[in-house]
Image (tube, rainbow, N blue to C red):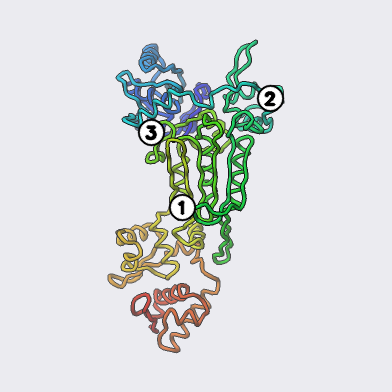
Amino acid sequence: MTTVPQLGEVPGSLTRDAFWELLGRVEHAQLDFKRGVATDVRDTIAAMAMTEGGLIVHGVDDRRCIVGCPLSQNTQDRITRIAMECGVDVQVRQVAVAAVRLTITAVPAVRRRIVTTPDGRLLRRVGGDSQPLRGDAMARFVREREQRTAEDQPVVVFDPSAYSIEAINEALRADGRPRVDAERIPRALADLQVAIPAPPPLDQRVLRAAVVLFARDPRGLLRGAAVQLVRRTGTGPRTGPTIERVECVGPLAAVVACCLEFIVRHSGGLEVVTGQRREALPAYPPTVVREAVVNALAHRDYGLAGATVDVTVWDDRVEVKSPGGLPGHVTVDNMREEHYSRNPRIMRVLKTLGYVEEYGEGVDRMFREMAARFMEPPVFEATAVSVAVTLRKRVLIDVEDQVWLSQLGTDELARNDAQILVLARREGAVTPRSLRTRIPGADVDALLARMVSKGLLRRVGVRGGSRYVLSEAIIARAGTGLPDDWQTHRQALLDEIRRLGSLSSAEGAVLIDRDVVYARALLNELAEVGLVRAEGRTRARRYYPD
């Protein structure tokens, strides 16, 4: 979920370009545009209060035309009355965009109580919509809100020397604040919203969130604030011999780094050569591994004293398990779209530090990144007391082919498209008949037509004899990914066909001392340009002089 600026950070006067650059034109969970102050504003206020808060901009219509909505007394009274009906304390301010006056309503995120619309509906922001919660999802959301989150519990004894000044200053720097010395640690924690300031002579309350984020050894203040990492041999499910066992402890950023180093070191990687290019690939996408670890630390239940986050690296998978069930209304089925922070203070600091890119998008990003590497999707399992995610190392497309595909520069290539491109690269050409056996259930004709229209493939021949080869644009961008002696080997095969009268892929492979796939690709290319004639199906095909 994209974030918006604080209301005080919005200048009183902006150009149109500056306005759109600051807020963006797309509505999302924290931004909504209204032409005026219609009755549906109460839905937006109630939904934003139950999500992450946000801004409502009055004076912009659905076409994103700035039509204006000055902050008159009537506008002020109407917004205030609607907010009071929902029980939300909003802020209202006027800004000028190219001399056109708009009104902006800032809605706070409300914690530890429930906000409904005047008619009793419980709403949440999902994208740019306000959607109701129903049934079990509503019941779990209400129970979660009624309970005080463990990160908000105050620390009994506060000792500044127990906290890492380096970690605190790094968070202050990321938040645009000046560095502090050890004497000003209490004030810095309040600025980072992990301590609650109090007027003298009272001492401010430092919260558990500060311990998790910045304590040198949080176990002394919060038992179980650590990660246990184990490397086991084998593929399970039975317990295999343990190779190494490590405990990561310290400020949360250091814990994340410690976990990632262990996982990368024990999961290995691959090195492949495509043409003249040598490429090293980690076993798992780094962003996915980091997201799994950060999610476990950010969303775990810190009220479960003594329970740790557990990471196990097997030969074929990585498992990350965190204490506490799924928070709020989130389920295994809706977690790609829904978002709920059990520990919003911790999440805010992680967002500031760059460990969380956008609220609510992490799980969806994990699925997309695994798909981009043609790996099996993450598997989430949740019980009442724990949440686990499993990343499997198995790939659906050979890693060497993945490296070649990465050179194409296309964003989020569809899996079927990628598979067809790999087959065309490996075999020199694909036909509708061969693809129907390779991709069962797919509309092959539509796939090929779309890939031709996108400039990925080129059709050769007509009707029943048509084949599809890599387009010139694809070859120019990434080549065939095959060795530089391609032309030499192709000429050797052509000479042998002319000498013997025919040749098979297997015979060609022996001639040039390469594998059959490589030889078949060369022979199919010769046939495609009309230098030889291919007869027979793929495995029994022979090539004759043309």
**Image coordinates for residue 13, horizontal then vertical, percent:** 50, 23
* Residues at marks 2 and 3, CA–CA distance in whole angstroms: 40 Å
Classify mark 3: residues with Cα within 10 Å, few (<14), some (14-19) or many (20+).
many
* Residues at marks 1 and 3, CA–CA distance in whole angstroms: 25 Å
Q: Which of the labelled discs sits on residue 485, or is there none?
A: none
Q: Which of pointers 1 and 3 lies earlier in the amino acid sequence?
A: 3
Q: What is the total number of numbered labels drawn onto the structure image?
A: 3
Quadrant of residue 465 within the rendered picture:
bottom left
Label 3 secondary element: strand
Q: Which of the labelled discs sits on residue 372, or is there none?
A: 1
> Is 204 on the left-hand or right-hand side of 418?
right
Q: Which residue is mark 3?
A: 126
Classify mark 2: residues with Cα within 10 Å, few (<14), some (14-19) or many (20+).
some
**Image coordinates for residue 314, horizontal then vertical, percent:** 53, 53
**Image coordinates for residue 136, horizontal then vertical, percent:** 34, 31
> Which quadrant would the C terminus be assigned to in this image?
bottom left
**Image coordinates for residue 316, horizontal then vertical, percent:** 51, 55
Q: Which of pointers 2 and 3 lies earlier in the amino acid sequence?
A: 3
Label 1 secondary element: helix
Q: Which residue is mark 2?
A: 160
Q: Residue at x 67, y 29 (%)?
A: 163
Amino acid carrying label 3: it is Val
